[in-house]
Amino acid sequence: MVMQDIFNKFKEEGGGFKASLCEDAMGLLSMYEAAHLGVKGEAILEEAKVFSTENLKILMERVERKLADRIEHAVEIPLHWRALRMEARWYIDVYEKEDGRIGDLLDRYCKLARFQHGANGVPN
């Protein structure tokens, strides 16, 4: 099953996403995060990004503060982007302090990513 097929399960026969999804904050957060795993040009994932982002922003005003903070944090930068950025930022800082230059940083970062995710792409 392709990711696009999964998103189609959440759509009405007319084509739009089901209105009932707008009341499920955790479901929308999951949709938002999953939609960001796609590749540019996948229309249904682009549509899911827009739908989930718009509705999460609306829900932020109506949910408890703790959940609103979580939504705000997620909408700022998707979780999987955030994790890579933080790791890369840390690694760049450490490497620059060590060598005083960037050099072969990309190669080293790729090795670090492979180490963290294991040979089969699954996080250790």
Image (cartoon, helix red, strand yellow):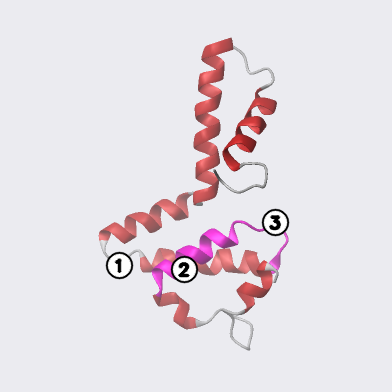
Crowd tier of the residue under label 1, counting other residues whose Cα lies within 10 Å: few below 14, some 14–19, many 20 or above: few
Q: Are marks 3 and 1 in contact (CB under 8 Å)?
A: no
The Cα–Cα distance between marks 3 and 1, rounded to whole angstroms, is 31 Å
Crowd tier of the residue under label 2, counting other residues whose Cα lies within 10 Å: few below 14, some 14–19, many 20 or above: many
For mark 2, what is the residue? 28
Q: Position of residue 104 (x, y in %)?
A: 69, 20
Residue drawn at the location 54% of the way across and 12% of the way down: 98
The residue furthest right is: 41
Which residue is at the front of the view, 98 or 85?
A: 98
Residue drawn at the location 39% of the way across and 76% of the way down: 23
Of mark 3 and mark 2, the one earlier in the sequence is 2
Of mark 2 and mark 1, the one earlier in the sequence is 2
Q: Secondary structure at mark 1?
A: loop
Q: Secondary structure at mark 2?
A: helix
The Cα–Cα distance between marks 2 and 1, rounded to whole angstroms, is 13 Å
The Cα–Cα distance between marks 3 and 2, rounded to whole angstroms, is 19 Å
Bounds of the magenta segment:
24-43
What's the residue type where badge 1 is placed? Val
For mark 3, what is the residue? 39
For mark 1, what is the residue? 63
Of mark 3 and mark 1, the one earlier in the sequence is 3
Query: Please, is residue 105 above or below residue 67 in the view?
Result: above
Count up the numbered dots. Answer: 3
Q: Name which quarter of the figure residue 44 lies in.
A: bottom right
Q: Quadrant of the C terminus?
A: top right
Q: Position of residue 46 (x, y in %)?
A: 63, 64
* Side of 59 relative to 18 (left or right): left
Crowd tier of the residue under label 3, counting other residues whose Cα lies within 10 Å: few below 14, some 14–19, many 20 or above: few
Query: Please, is residue 103 above or below residue 42 in the view?
Result: above
